[in-house]
Image (spheres, grey):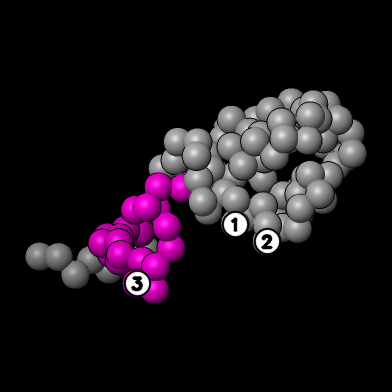
């Protein structure tokens, strides 16, 4: 099994590249058939581009996979600590409210 990725974007790109190589297709061929630039495909594969679901679906179809199958392959390439759980996401600290000149200050 290939090494795992710490980010979902990297895992998706690696899943696309592995499947493309399995099929013996070039980035140019994927791009042409999906209606995307080959440089865009290269950026997706390297994790530099975060594609929309619609673009991922178009790429998956060229790779003869359903969107779900491609997502499953990407999930298998993610590290264990990145995998989804039923636990809620950790909460972020609340942002401090920025006072404007029009608002009265509560500070003394």
Question: Mark 2 — residue?
Answer: 68
Residue 47, percent from left and from top = 56, 35
Q: Nearer the viewer, mark 3 or mark 2?
A: 2
Write the start and end of the magenta stretch as one range. 78-100
Q: CA distance from mark 3 to mark 1?
A: 20 Å
Q: Does residue 10 appear in this view? A: yes
| Magenta segment includes 91 | yes
Which residue appears at 50% of the width and 36% of the height? 2
Residue 49, percent from left and from top = 62, 37
Query: Is 38 placed above or below 64 here?
Result: above
Q: Nearer the viewer, mark 3 or mark 1?
A: 1
Which residue appears at 50% of the width and 39% of the height? 1
* Residues tagged 3 and 2 counted as in contact (Cβ below 8 A): no
42 sits to left or right of 104: right
Residue 89 in which image quadrant: bottom left
Which residue is nearer to you in this view: 101 or 22?
A: 22
Q: Residues within 10 Å of mark 2 (few under 14, many from 20)?
A: few
Q: Residues within 10 Å of mark 1 (few under 14, many from 20)?
A: few
* Residues tagged 3 and 1 counted as in contact (Cβ below 8 A): no
Q: Does residue 37 appear in this view? A: no
Query: Is 48 placed above or below 59 here?
Result: above
Question: Mark 1 — residue?
Answer: 72
Q: How many marks?
A: 3
Residue 72, percent from left and from top = 59, 57
* Residues tagged 1 and 2 counted as in contact (Cβ below 8 A): yes
Which residue appears at 59% of the width and 30% of the height? 46
Q: CA distance from mark 1 to mark 2?
A: 6 Å
Q: CA distance from mark 3 to mark 2?
A: 22 Å
- Point out the residue furthest to the front here: 1
Question: Mark 3 — residue?
Answer: 87
């Amino acid at each position: 099994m290939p090494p795992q990725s710490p980010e979902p974007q990297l895992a998706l790109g690696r899943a696309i590249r592995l499947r493309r190589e399995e099929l013996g297709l070039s980035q140019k061929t994927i791009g042409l058939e999906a209606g995307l630039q080959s440089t865009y495909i290269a950026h997706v594969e390297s994790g530099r581009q975060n594609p929309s679901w619609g673009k991922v679906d178009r790429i998956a179809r060229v790779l003869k996979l359903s969107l779900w199958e491609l997502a499953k392959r990407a999930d298998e390439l993610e590290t264990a600590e990145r995998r989804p759980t039923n636990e809620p996401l950790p909460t972020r600290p609340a942002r401090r409210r920025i006072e404007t000149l029009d608002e009265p200050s509560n500070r003394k």
